[in-house]
């Protein structure tokens, strides 16, 4: 599998694994089949994938603990990214909040490291820039402090605008960003361009989504179905393959709770699309700057 560098010293597979689905309903609580979840995580590592994405808000906390219990002690080449700053008031998307205070973000990082069983977190994201208790720049300064202390190896930003990304880069090196970007939704298009220019990794969330409500599904099908038929693949596999062709900075993190589905995602990394096919899919959706979504 091809690789990409996170910062200057961590080389990971260009296809990662997003562990968010290994939680309860509404990303709340424990995954109902613990042994199956452990099998999937071990299958991820056995497949050769070397990048796993999680967050303290997934569960909350249960996802990080599950990764520890399934995989610790970790293979030397495995990179685990986690996030802090979101707070949860209950299951479902309607109960998210954000806290960006100095001590809270420090607590997030220290407790994530404890749950994961590591002395240093390879990649720690500010999960959202939406906290109103502390200026965004001050939140970044807290992460820079934790990096200087050695608790964080690299800093990432989630759901930020391109402007916020540049503001953060004036304070400290930013190794990775994550935002909404896929075949049908390009909210993070301007952030992708900024990440490419800065040499940062771009990790799109909801990477396998193909159509959003209100879009012309027939127009998408007319373009995508023949390409799928040509390669004998599914629409989600095509979505992953397109992302990997779209930019060398791309690090998709599709999630699944199934070993069979995991194998299908991995096969997508071997699909060689033509330049015309990549451009045709790219032009399905205008990549104009949009308001950044603050929700995942």
Image (cartoon, grey):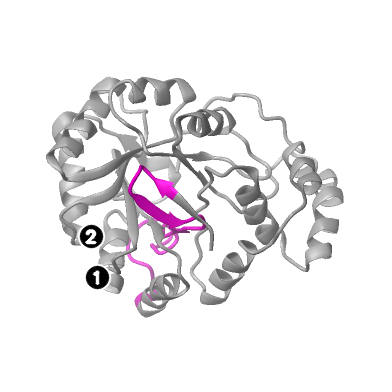
Residue sitting at the far front: 8
Compared to 271, does 292 lie above or below?
Answer: above
Give left or right: position of 140 versus 91: left
Residue at image coords 41%, 26%: 165
Query: What is the distance, in whole Å, between disc 2 and disc 1 at their CAs?
Result: 8 Å
Residue 67 image position (x, y, % from top left) = 31, 65
Q: Which residue is mark 1?
A: 72
Residue 88 visible from this viewpoint: no
Crowdedness near tag 1: few (<14), some (14–19) or many (≥20) residues, C-alpha within 10 Å: few
Q: Are marks 2 and 1 in contact (CB under 8 Å)?
A: yes
Residue at image coords 81%, 57%: 227
Residue at image coords 56%, 44%: 248
Pick the front one: 231 or 115: 231
Q: Which residue is mark 2?
A: 116
Residue 59 visible from this viewpoint: yes
Helix, strand or loop under label 1: loop
Give left or right: position of 256 versus 282: left
Q: Read off the magenta span.
A: 5-34
Residue 54 image position (x, y, % from top left) = 36, 54
Looking at the magenta stretch, what is its main secondary structure? loop
Q: In the figure, residue 135 lies in which quadrant?
A: top left
Query: Can residue 144 be found in the magenta stretch?
Result: no
Residue at image coords 59%, 65%: 265
């Amino acid at each position: 599998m091809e690789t990409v560098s996170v910062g200057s010293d961590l080389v990971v597979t260009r296809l990662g694994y997003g562990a968010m689905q290994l939680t309860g309903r509404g990303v709340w609580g424990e995954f109902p089949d613990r042994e199956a979840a452990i099998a999937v995580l071990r299958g991820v590592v056995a497949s050769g994938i070397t990048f796993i994405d999680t967050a303290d808000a997934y569960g909350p906390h249960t996802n990080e603990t599950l990764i520890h219990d399934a995989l610790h002690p970790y293979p030397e080449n495995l990179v685990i990214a986690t996030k802090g700053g979101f707070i949860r008031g209950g299951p479902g998307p309607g109960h998210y909040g954000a806290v960006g205070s100095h001590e809270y973000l420090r607590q997030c990082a220290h407790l994530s490291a404890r749950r994961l069983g590591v002395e240093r977190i390879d990649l720690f994201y500010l999960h959202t820039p939406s906290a109103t208790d502390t200026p965004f720049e001050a939140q970044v300064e807290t992460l820079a402090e934790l990096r200087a202390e050695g608790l964080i190896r690299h800093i990432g930003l989630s759901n930020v605008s391109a402007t916020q990304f540049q503001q953060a880069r004036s304070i400290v090196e930013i190794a990775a960003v994550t935002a909404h970007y896929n075949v049908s939704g390009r909210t993070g298009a301007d952030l992708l361009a900024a990440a490419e220019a800065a040499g940062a990794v771009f990790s799109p969330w909801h990477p396998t989504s193909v159509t959003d409500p209100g879009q012309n599904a027939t127009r998408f099908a007319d373009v995508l179905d023949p390409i799928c038929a040509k390669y004998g693949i599914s629409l989600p596999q095509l979505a992953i393959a397109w992302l990997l062709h779209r930019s060398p900075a791309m690090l998709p993190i599709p999630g699944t709770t199934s070993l069979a589905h995991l194998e299908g995602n991995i096969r997508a990394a071997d699909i060689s699309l033509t330049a015309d096919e990549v451009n045709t899919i790219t032009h399905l959706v205008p990549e104009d700057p949009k308001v950044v979504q603050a929700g995942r």
